[in-house]
């Protein structure tokens, strides 16, 4: 009786990384290097070693390390905005709850984190010397301000108070958040996350009481 032919093992299928996959891998490696070493982590050699690839692959995908770092900045900025947007979408469907969700998410453990803020501070410094990063920052900053602008505009409409320049108010609120992030990154003992939330809520109460209800410069 013939022995049955043993079944062949299925061949493993390997998917070649797409350029998008590879770019993201390099961008995430850049973020890890900057998180660990600050500005000193902005190095093609170190990023390549972190990603487990050759420096030539960075050149192939980005041309120069500055372009890779700018891409990493885009990844991080987009990721933060996505988390904030997800918090807004998950909130109760009323303007107060949506704005409060944005504030609370801004001080959540996922975002209000020393590692995240260290990288953010490095990027802020590099923006001044990189036209590519400066262009990205302007676009992404506009997205953040537009998000806040919609939130406070909806709040004003629902509660019946006036804001003379909604965009200027959104710029001011975004500056408050950025300042709190920077202050806490430099000295985490300065205040607690819940203090940051309370400060932001107090600022919004100022809008209700008439802050930004008149053109700047008027008594």
Image (cartoon, rainbow, N blue to C red):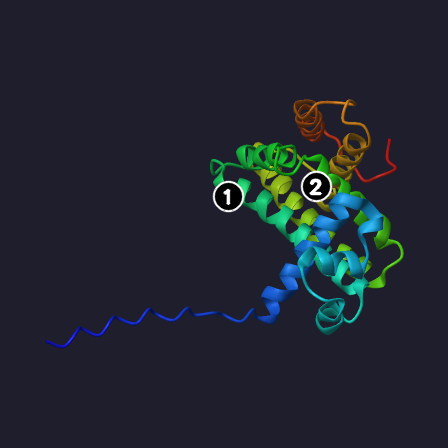
Dot 2 falls on a residue whose secondary structure is: helix
Which image quarter is the N terminus in?
bottom left
Which image quarter is the C terminus in?
top right
Image coordinates of residue 100 in percent, x first then y, are 59, 32
Label 2: how many residues lie within 10 Å, few (<14), some (14-19) or many (20+)? some
Q: CA distance from mark 1 to mark 2?
A: 23 Å
Image coordinates of residue 127 in percent, x first then y, are 84, 54
Reading the image, the residue beneath label 1 is 89
The numbered disc on residue 116 is 2
Q: Residue furthest bottom?
A: 2
Q: Is residue 155 left or right of residue 187?
A: left
Q: Residue furthest front?
A: 1
Circles 1 and 2, Cβ within 8 Å, touching? The answer is no
Q: Residue furthest left?
A: 1
Is there any visible trace of residue 32 in the rendered image? Answer: yes
Image coordinates of residue 104 in percent, x first then y, are 60, 32
Q: Quadrant of residue 105?
A: top right
Frontmost residue, 176 versus 172: 176
The residue at 70%/49% (across/down) is: 32
Q: Earlier in the sequence, mark 1 or mark 2?
A: 1
């Amino acid at each position: 009786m013939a022995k049955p032919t043993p079944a062949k093992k299925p061949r493993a299928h390997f998917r070649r990384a797409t350029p998008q996959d590879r770019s993201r891998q390099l961008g995430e490696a850049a973020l890890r290097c900057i998180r660990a070493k600050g500005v000193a982590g902005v190095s093609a050699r170190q990023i390549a070693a972190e990603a487990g690839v050759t420096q030539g692959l960075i050149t192939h995908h980005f041309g120069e390390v500055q372009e890779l770092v700018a891409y990493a900045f885009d990844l991080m900025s987009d990721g933060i905005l996505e988390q904030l947007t997800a918090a807004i979408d998950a909130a109760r469907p009323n303007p107060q709850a949506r704005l409060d969700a944005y504030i609370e998410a801004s001080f959540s453990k996922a975002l209000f984190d020393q590692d995240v803020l260290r990288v953010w501070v490095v990027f802020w410094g590099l923006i001044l010397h990189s036209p590519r990063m400066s262009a990205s920052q302007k676009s992404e900053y506009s997205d953040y301000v537009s998000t806040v602008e919609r939130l406070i505009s909806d709040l004003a409409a629902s509660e019946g108070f006036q804001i003379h320049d909604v965009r200027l108010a959104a710029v001011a609120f975004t500056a408050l958040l950025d300042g709190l992030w920077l202050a806490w990154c430099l000295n985490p003992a300065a205040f607690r996350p819940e203090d940051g939330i309370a400060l932001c809520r107090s600022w919004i109460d100022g809008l209700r009481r008439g802050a930004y209800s008149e053109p700047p410069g008027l008594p």
